[in-house]
Amino acid sequence: MLTSLAIFAATGALAGFLAGLLGIGGGMVLVPALIFSFEALGVSPTVLTHLAVGTSLASIVLTSISSVRTHHAQGGVDVELFKRLAPGLVIGSLLGAQIAHALPARTLQIVIGIFAVWTGLKMFRGNKPIAADAPAPTATQLNAVGGVIGVASAIFGIGGGSLMVPYLVKQGVAMRRAVGTAAACGFPIAIAGMIGFIYSGWGLSELPAGSTGYIYWPALAGIALTSMVAAHGGAVMAHRLPAQQLKRAFAVLLVLVGARFLFGI
């Protein structure tokens, strides 16, 4: 039990730091790590992946609070843009949790993996600046984008930063502000996704003791011990690194994320 708690605590520290640094919510680290841990604990294969995704989303609720507070204090969150994205994020995340429960996710993993690798390589090379007179996205467009990102994020247990940051940068948002706003977007995604996974997994006999739906509370407790402090440190570092260095670090992460989706590693 203590060994499992230590593993979950170490995982939380790494995921929290990456959440604060890159606005990703840490899900890209947590989901595969939780799957491995649950396999070692003998959790049923029929619920193992769903349990990892649901628990990852629950942990993002915690990491995003610390990360968002730091980004907001340093002027890194576009509050008005966040407000326009939030409704779509919530609806999409709720829907994504139900899709994850009802359908196999392998095809969607491949699609998202290809997108993540393509976006990461494009960001590493550098994005072309948008013309000054380029029209700002409408509220309808932002709700639609939020919905798509919410669905994908809930299915894969991520905070949405790996999808949201490239979109915001493409819209001409400065990298640091894009990261901070993406971190804020992770909170409604995680809350809605957690509720959706609790609902869809409620009462399943295959779930291990200590679970509520697809949330495994012992793992969440271990992650919570370290993730919020580490998220604060990551967010502080995000505002000290050069913008180009931060962008390239994020691009490398996107390629690694895409490889995980494509090859199941």
Image (cartoon, rainbow, N blue to C red):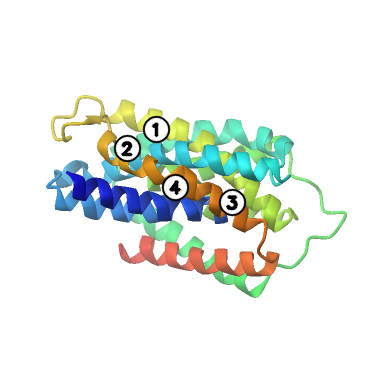
Give the amino acid type for the residue marked by disc 3 in the picture: Ala
Q: Which residue is mark 1?
A: 194
Q: In front of the other: label 2 or label 1?
A: 2
Q: Earlier in the sequence, mark 3 or mark 4?
A: 4
Q: Earlier in the sequence, mark 2 or mark 4?
A: 4
Indicate left or right for 121 with 213 as reference.
right
Q: Which residue is mark 3?
A: 235
Q: CA distance from mark 1 to mark 4?
A: 11 Å
Give the amino acid type for the residue marked by disc 2 in the picture: Ala
Please tell me whether mark 3 sits on a helix, a strand or a loop.
helix
Q: Which residue is mark 4?
A: 158
Indicate left or right for 216 with 144 as reference.
left
Q: Residue at x 53, y 67 (%)?
A: 118
Q: Residue at x 23, y 31 (%)?
A: 211
Q: CA distance from mark 2 to mark 1?
A: 15 Å
Q: Quadrant of residue 132?
A: bottom right
Can residue 28 be seen from the camera position used here? no
Give the amino acid type for the residue marked by disc 1 in the picture: Met
Residue 221 - label: 2
**46 or 38, which is in the foreground?**
38
Q: Position of residue 220 (x, y in %)?
A: 33, 39
